[in-house]
Structures are given as C-alpha cells and as structure tokens.
Amino acid sequence: MSGIRIASKSIDDLNLIYKKIKKDFQALDSIKLNHETLEYELHLNRVALDGYLKAICDKVIDTDDLMDDESVFDQFTISDFMAMMTPDQVAIPLRPLKTVWADLTKEKQQACFNYFCEEMELNGEETVF
C-alpha cells in the first residue's frame, strides 16, 4: 500500500486537498501540527484491494479475454461499470465479482474500478464515485 503525506500552513487548505483526493486515499490518523515546520500534516494510504479481491478482479479480466463476445471493458466508465453490476444477471466475466459486490464498501468498489483501469490500461474517464 503506497502512502503520502500532505502538509499545509492552513488547516482549511489541508482539508480542501484531502476532500479532493479522499476517494483514492484513506487517512491513517488525524491532522497533526508539525512543531518544526509549523505546518499541519495528514498521512494517507492509497485504498488498495485485498488479496482475495485482487484475485477476483484478475479472474474477471482473464474471463473477459477468453470470451468471444464484446468486452465489458469497452467504453469503460464508472457509471457504466456500476450499471453493469446492479442487475441480477450480469455479464459472464463479471459474475465472480458480483458474488461479493454487495458486501464491498464504496471505497473497495472504487478500488476495483481503478484496478481494472490500471490493468487494462484504460483512461477511466469518470473516476469519481
């Protein structure tokens, strides 16, 4: 899991920055004042997939590659992805992910989308959940 540290002289600026990147990162602790630099700091980690969820996403990618039908990754946006995951009958490649989808947090669902975009080298146009 990759981490970053954001810092600012103003706590309001720090909160503004965090709100913009909140979908991709989770805070490790609360905002703290660095007494040496007199800046407010927040340590963050990138939201990552658990091992089992990464294996499921890899299975989706592999199954999609084997299918002769249209790929589920054609015109892949977050709104299309969410629409594909809502019906009871989903596309064959997405079935392994559908079995655990309802139990996932919004952050993990977003992480799945981001993982697909990275692995399939997609632009991921609408990345805001």
Image: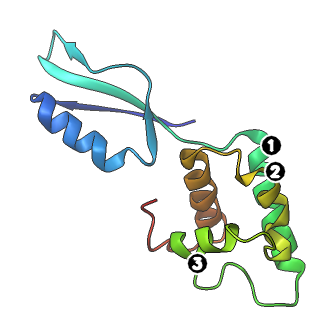
At x 66%, y 71%, the residue is 120
Q: Give the class, few, some or many, for how many residues have Cα within 10 Å of label 2's Cα (few <14, many ≥20).
A: some
Q: Cα distance, mark 3 to mark 2?
A: 20 Å
Disc 3 crowd rating (10 Å Cα; few below 14, some 14-19, many 20+) is some
The foreground one among 41 and 99 is 99
- Report crowding for label 1: few under 14, some 14 to 19, many 20 or more residues within 10 A (C-alpha): few
Residue 77 visible in this rendered orientation of the protein? no
Expressed as whole percent of the image width and height from the top left, the position of residue 27 reads 41, 29
- Secondary structure of residue under mark 2: helix
Is there CB contact under 8 Å for labels 3 and 2? no
CB contact under 8 Å: marks 2 and 1: yes
Mark 2 to mark 1 CA distance (whole Å): 5 Å
* Residue 118 pos. (x, y %): 59, 63
Question: Label 3 belongs to which residue?
Answer: 76
Chain-order first, disc 3 or disc 2: 2
Q: Position of residue 36 (x, y in %)?
A: 15, 11
Q: Which mark is residue 55?
A: 2
Extreme bottom residue here? 69
Which residue is more in the foreground, 4 or 87? 87
Q: Amino acid at mark 3?
A: Phe
Residue located at (90% from left, 79% from top) = 66
Q: Which residue is mark 1?
A: 52
- Work out whether 6 lies above or below 120: above
- Tell me the SS state at disc 3: loop
Instruction: Name the amino acid, label 1.
Output: Tyr
Check disc 2 and give the amino acid type. Ala
Q: Is residue 54 visible?
A: yes
Any mark on residue 80, and which?
Answer: none
Q: Quadrant of residue 7?
A: top left
Colouring style: rainbow
On the image, which quarter does residue 74 sit in? Answer: bottom right
